[in-house]
Amino acid sequence: MTDKNVYGPWAVVAGGSEGVGAAFADRLADAGINLVLIARKPGPLNETAEKVRAKGVEVRTLELDLLDPGALAAIRAVTDGLEVGLLIFNAGANSYGHEFVTGDLTRVQGVLDLNITAQMALTHHFGALMKERGRGGIMLVGSLSGYLGQAQISVYSAAKAFSRVFAEGLWLELRPHGVHVLELVLGVTRTPAMERAGLRMDLPGLRVA
């Protein structure tokens, strides 16, 4: 991920404003890789951009909801003409937790559109360009939720299971063409989003590395 000759000169980080995405941006900037950061919230997005820009890399930002039907076109408007060697899809989230049979199907569809449809659209576009160049990398950020069904988040868990199997298939397809594919499976992680959701990481007896 930090080899500029393989994964540079540009990386696209979807969900690159805070938490895990900001950590990716920081690490890539240390490696001298220029960044396109995509996120919904302008405040954290611009803050992260300024921080990594100070490391000497070029940074482009795009304030965007990936559920927008024109999302890919907006991303292409910023990235066409750039040699993107790395795509990190870190934008997946459980945007609607509810019992499935009594839930709102429109909001359920939003979970699928973000975690599956948007992920496929970006992977399809950038993956094809990487295959043509014969190098690059795709990282899909997954979750332990994708390993078992859970009440209230059954659709999100299923979407994350899709992501894992999707990554395995992509790895087989793109490996002969010099493109690396990895799903990074996250466990419980202290991030601003998790803290806003009410996750408590400071319980008595709980040690956080």
Image: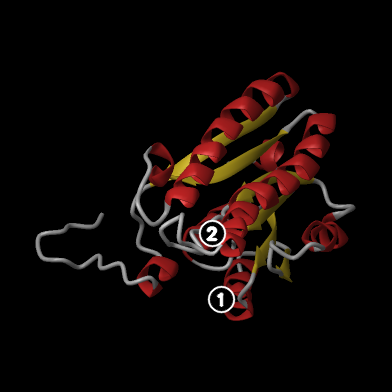
x 61%, y 50%: residue: 89
Residue 201 visible in the picture: yes
Disc on res. 150: none
**Quadrant of the rendered structure where residue 92 is?**
bottom right
Q: Residues at badges 1 and 2 in contact (C-beta under 8 Å)?
A: no
Q: Secondary structure at mark 1?
A: helix
x, y percentage for residue 102? 45, 61
**Quarter that holds the N terminus:** top right
The outermost residue toward the bottom is 43
x, y percentage for residue 23? 49, 59
**Quadrant of the rendered structure where residue 137 is?**
top right
| Comes first in the chain, label 1 or label 2 | 2
x 57%, y 27%: residue: 168
The residue carrying pointer 2 sits among few (fewer than 14), some (14 to 19) or many (20 or more) residues within 10 Å by Cα, namely many
Between 188 and 67, the residue placed more toward the observer is: 67
x, y percentage for residue 195? 36, 71
Q: Secondary structure at mark 2?
A: helix
What amino acid is at disc 1?
Pro
- Residue that mark 2 sits on: 21
What amino acid is at disc 2?
Gly
Q: Is residue 76 left or right of residue 26?
A: right
Q: CA distance from mark 1 to mark 2?
A: 11 Å
Query: What count of labels does the image hold?
Result: 2
- Residue that mark 1 sits on: 44
